[in-house]
Every structure is written in C-alpha cells, then in structure tokens.
Amino acid sequence: MSNARKAVPSLSFNGKNVNTSLADYLQSVSCEDVASGRSDAITITLQNIDTKWLNKWYPSKGDRIAGSIAFKNWEKDGDDRKVNCGTFVLDEIKLSGGPLEVRISGIAIPASESFKIRERTKTWKNATIKKIGQEIAGRYKLGLSYSGPNIQIASIEQTDKSDSAFLYDVCQKYGLSMKVFNDKIIIYDQTAQEKKSAILTLSRASFVDDDWEYTDALEGTYTGARVSYKSGQDNEEISVYLGLKAENASDSRVLNITETAEDQNTAYYMAAAQVNKSNEKATTLSGKIWTDPAICAGICVTISGMGKANGKYFVDKSTIEVTDSGTTQNVELHKCQKRLTYTPKPVTQAKPPAKKSYKVGDIVNFHGGTHYVSSYSGAKGYSARAGRAKITLGPNCAGNGKAHPWHLIHVDGSSNVYGWVDEGTFD
C-alpha cells in the first residue's frame, strides 16, 4: 500500500517547538519567498474558538518564528523533501470574529527594529557594495552572502534613511538584487542567475485548474538608456549612452534617466540597472501551480507547450500555503531577456618615470637644502642655496658613508653648495 503524500509544516517560537501545542489550532501556514526587493514573509492562521489568543496565549511583537515544510512521499513513496522557510520576526497580529481566528505575520528582518526604522545619515567614501553590506550586516549580527561584482563607490550619501532602505537602494542603483533570508543579507547579480540553466519545465498542465495569466507588453521595454553624470571641478554635466544596439537604430527604444549620476561608472551602472528592471515587466507569467518544492524564488524554469508564452523564465516570487484542505503554490515569473551589462574598463597604472642615473662630472640642478661635511650619518650640516653644481664624488667612491652619498661643488654664484648631499636633492 502506498503512503499518502502530504505537506507538514513545522514551527518554533523563540527557539521552542510549538507543533504539539498548535496542533488543534493551526489552520494554515503560508511562506512567501521573494527574489529581491523585500524580505521573505510567513503568515500563520489559527482558530481562536476558546479565545486563548486574546488572553494568555497572546504573542508578542518581536517574537522569533522559525518555519519549515516537510513534503512526505511527494512524487512517490519515499520521496521526502524539506523547504526551509527561514527565520522571521513577528511584526503583526490580527484577531477577528465570525469565525474566531488569529493571523500572525512575520518578516525576515533582524529583531532590532532599527534595521528597518531608524534613520541614519552617513557619507560612505571609497567603499565597495560588499563592504557596505558587511558593515550593515555586522551592526545587526546578520550574515552576508555576496556574489556580485566588485563595485567600487567613490562616495555615496545615506541621508535620513534606514540601513534596510539604504542598502536596498544602493543594490538597485547598481543593478544588484538583495533579500533578507534566515538571518542573512543576500546580495547577488541577477544577470548571472538568469544565465544559469532552467532547473525544470512547466507546461499549461502544471497550472491548477488552468489558473494562469500571461502578459506581454511593449510599454517599459528598452534597448538602452541615456544618463548624465557630473565631471571635473566645475561639475560639468556629461551625457552618456549605454545600449544593446545603436542609439539611433530604427528599432531602438531609449530610456532617458532624469537622475544625474555622481561619476561615469555610476552612470553606466545606473543605465544598465534601470533598463533591466523595466524590461523585467515586459513579459510576465503568474498563476497557481501544482506544488513543487524545487521551485523557489531566484531560479529559472522553462515554459513549454504554451505557444508565444514559451521560453525561459526567472522566478520572482513563490508562495507555498499549507492548509487542512491541501497545499497550494503561487508563482510570479518574468521572461528572461537579453540584459544590459556594464563592466568598468581596468584602470591602467601609469609607469613611474625611469630613475635617472648620474656619474662623477655631471652638471646637475641642486634643489637647495643642506650640505654636510661628510657622507656619514650624524655629520654636521649647513644650509645651501639652490643652483647649478658639479658631481665630484658618488656613492661608489672609497669610504662613502652612504647617508649623504653625493658630493657637489657649485659651478657659479647662484649656489653655495660645497659638500655632501642626500639622494634626490638634485636633477
């Protein structure tokens, strides 16, 4: 006899397993998994027929909730899987009557409210996005997973913004994705994610009761962007273009960005980021699918057998809900487009000028300073004027003390140098 497939949620509050105590009350658990832009979330619905949740069982905002879903015998006997929903902070409690219910919601943010609420003002200079993420994560005892490019920022202002809002804004501005999951800030390059192979294929039959919606729009789709940045001490505004094709091509659609970037690199990053973000809305597909634990936000799937809707899609959001009557999964996808990218040109370091060699007999220009009575350390020195002089002894002469290795004698009245001088005091 085959075992029935089932999904079993598991919950803990403040580190204490509550599965047994909630068994007679639990009606549903919904876990929302997002690719970027906001935190993951959990919603727990419980019956409140004995009004315990209005009295001694009333939870506290700020409680820590951990959740997971075990899928038993899912595709066949012995096919057991587990989805870790993560760790959340309880941020909202709703109680209602008719019927008596309580709905508890949590989001994947640190317990400290200052991450999302406290506004800070700070100037970040010569920092990478990874470095900014590390400092903010450390402030709230969060981990950081960073898999984006090494983006260097000369200067950026955090003005009256919470750390959460500021870091989201920085990532969005430079074309990176960010989310908070399981006590960790995750920052990644979505372009790299969309290049990865699709992990499975969905068809029209994958949608429960044919519940799906496909949208294909021209509005908001662009082939490039034009943006300005400030340059030079006079703050001159320079306009630049970045695109998948020539700006004046007959089928080009150019996004004009009104915001001005701080420098050239930021301007190009901003152009790529805004074009890609807008183009993600061009072709979308959403609906209720037969629950598959393998489908989560941030992965790619293939749509097949749906005509013009066919293609490779990125999962923006997945919501799994377990109730007494069954398990459902809703997904939101966007079609993978060719993404606009920017890689800064490597900075070529200027070669230092070749060191000039000198020899006894050369006429040189003495810069002025001190001439000494001997070449040894501790020798008495006197002030000498700048001017033309002749090298009479060098570092390789017998008995040279090396501290003041060159002996100069002035050749005209402009200088009075007559003694031992330091390296680098003439050319």
Image (cartoon, rainbow, N blue to C red):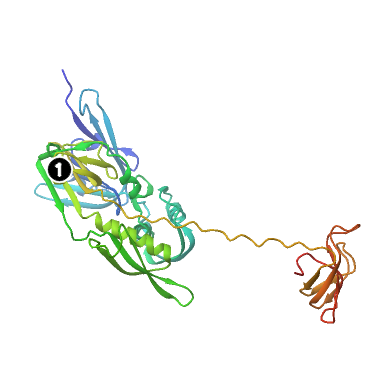
Q: How busy is the neighbourhood of tag 1: few (under 14 within 10 Å), some, or many (20 plus)?
A: many
Question: Which residue does the image show at 61% across and 59% down from the upper left?
Answer: 351
Vertical side of 210 occupied by 339: above or below: below
Return the residue nearer the eye: 346 or 294.
346
Q: Which residue is mark 1?
A: 288
Percent across and percent down for residue 78 are 24, 23
On the image, which quarter does residue 167 sit in?
Answer: bottom left
- Residue 57 in sight: no
Return the residue nearer the eye: 308 or 184.
308
Vertical side of 418 occupied by 175: above or below: above
Identify the secondary structure beneath mark 1. Answer: strand
Vertical side of 262 occupied by 180: above or below: above
On the image, which quarter does residue 205 sit in?
Answer: top left
Percent across and percent down for residue 251 are 22, 61
Residue type at tag 1: Lys
Q: Residue furthest top?
A: 1
- Residue 334 in sight: yes
